[in-house]
Image (cartoon, rainbow, N blue to C red):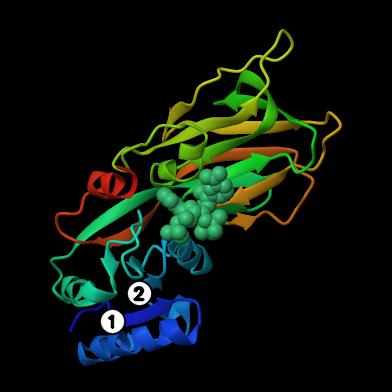
Amino acid sequence: MSVRNNMYFYYSKEEEVEAKLKPLFQLAKNNQFNLVDNIQEANVIISVGGDGMFLQAVRESNFRQNAIYAGLSRDGESSLYCDFNLDNFDELLYSVLHEEMEVRRFPIIKARVNEGRDFYCLNELTIRSTIVKTIVLDVFIDDQHFETFRGDGMVIATPTGSTAYNKSTNGAIIDPKISCYQVTEIASMNNNNFRTLGSSFVLNKERKLTLLEIEDGNDHPIVSFDNEAFPIRKINKIEISMDDKVVKTVKLKNNTYWDRVKRMFL
Ligand code: NAP
């Protein structure tokens, strides 16, 4: 029997979804899986919904290193994190049971705000103005001053997050096999007083990015980690780096990242 046999389904508790999932629960039980009620006890975590749901499942289970994740999308939806859907769930079970499964390892970002505890992001970290005024940030790469940013905000994205918010801010799509993270601007001001690079830049895994908030009449930008807002409103300093942790997902055969990018956008 597989050692990975504690399965948790993460989904919105709606009657319609539950009805569709019932046969899948039974199929899992018939294949020697225990359905557990506590996500922390699971070693196979399955989100049902789209990419947003997958992000939520990873976040709520706290980026577990000893669990494998899989995304099930609902009828006909394309998504970047979900290889499976309600119709090919048996393929997912087969892969997990037969130890021959292909596993993807997605790099994640680690962020420390105001020298507090570490937070992880699978898609991105953002810092954004919440009022009509711009925010001002001093940007350091490996503790060396790089630029002073003034504008609406910045997006610091992982490779798998590059197709999300990062793409809307004209960032490049990055292959998740590259351990790096990308910094994109949201509406920077460029004039004789403020000058930024004006294009996205990509930092190697080993580099550290530091953002220092300059108090300039806008002291309350909002920081987000994927789909969660950071609860503390007074932000002084954010230190960002890539972590050694990864998010492991079950891969459907013949379904590369670029297949999914093509399916979703072209
Ligand atoms: P949401 O605002 O309800 O939905 C955001 C959309 O982004 C959903 O359609 C979601 O896909 C999609 N998405 C999430 N991760 C993606 C990825 N890696 N590649 C491509 N598309 C992706 O928020 P949510 O569902 O909680 O997701 C949070 C994410 O929304 C954030 O991490 C951020 O990337 C994104 N976001 C984007 C913008 C923007 O582009 N202007 C602004 C704010 C937030 P599904 O429909 O499959 O769930």
Image quadrant assignment for residue 204 = top left
Tell me the crowding category of disc 1: few under 14, some 14 to 19, or many 20 or more residues within 10 angstroms, Cα based.
many
**Secondary structure at numbered mark 1:** loop
The reply to whether the C-beta atoms of the residues labelled 1 and 2 are less than 8 Å apart is yes
- Report the disc number at residue 5: 1
Residue 172 can be seen, yes or no:
yes
> What distance separates the C-alpha of mark 1 from that of mark 2?
7 Å
Q: Is residue 237 above or below residue 244?
A: above
First-in-chain label (1 vs 2): 1
Question: Which residue matches tag 2?
Answer: 43
Tell me the crowding category of disc 2: few under 14, some 14 to 19, or many 20 or more residues within 10 angstroms, Cα based.
many
Three-letter code, disc 2: Asn
Q: Residue furthest top?
A: 192
Image quadrant assignment for residue 86 = bottom left
Say whether residue 199 is left or right of residue 49: right
Task: Classify the position of the N terminus by image quarter.
Answer: bottom left
Percent x, y of residue 166: 49, 39
Residue ID at (66%, 55%): 229
Say which of 1 and 199 sits in front: 199
Task: Classify the position of the C terminus by image quarter.
Answer: top left
